[in-house]
Amino acid sequence: MAGRILSVFLLIGAMFLAVSVKEIYGTGSLTEPRDATPEIQGYVDQVRSDVETDVNRELEMYEATTYRTQLVNGVNYFIKVHIGGAEYLHLRLYKSNGGDVSYVSAKDGMKFDDELVYFQ
């Protein structure tokens, strides 16, 4: 009997956790913008050569400023990167459940006030 009660409590706890995670991360939806952290800058640094190849130029400045996430089978990161003057890039990176970070795409020609939104 005690085992059944414990099982019920564990099941209820797991349900609350799943609901809480979904409310925080919103499967499929983007989180609110957050200030970039050293971890986010590290992800951006990992893919810098791919980004420079894609935008067809070497970037002297390359500083992540804000980001949003999207929970999928892994995590999509949408990151605003200051590249000097009034210029910004919006990057889309993917982090697998195994922890590997990969470059997906970039939007070039962005400005400080451009909202960080979902893009392919």
Image: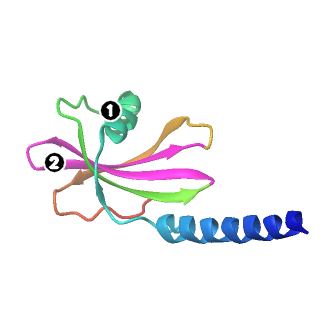
| Secondary structure mostly taken by the magenta-highlighted segment of the chain | strand
Which quarter of the image is occupied by the N terminus?
Answer: bottom right
Residue contact between numbered discs 2 and 1, judged by CB atoms under 8 Å = no
Q: Residues within 10 Å of mark 1 (few under 14, many from 20)?
A: few
Closest to the observer: 99 or 57?
99
Question: Which residue is at 30% across, 57% downward?
Answer: 34
Residue 27 in view here: no
Is residue 111 toward the left or the right of residue 8 in the image? left
Q: In the image, is residue 71 above or below residue 97?
A: below
Residue hosting label 2? 87
Q: Position of residue 31 (x, y in %)?
A: 41, 64
Name the one closer to the observer, 8 or 26.
8
5 to 81, vertically: above or below: below
Q: Which residues are magenta?
A: 73-96
Inter-mark Cα distance, 2 to 1: 14 Å
Q: Give amino acid for label 1.
A: Glu
Asked if residue 118 is among those painted magenta in the image, a careful observer would answer no
Considering only vertical position in the picture, is 26 above or below 39? below
Which image quarter: residue 52? top left
Q: Residue at x 40, y 32 (%)?
A: 47
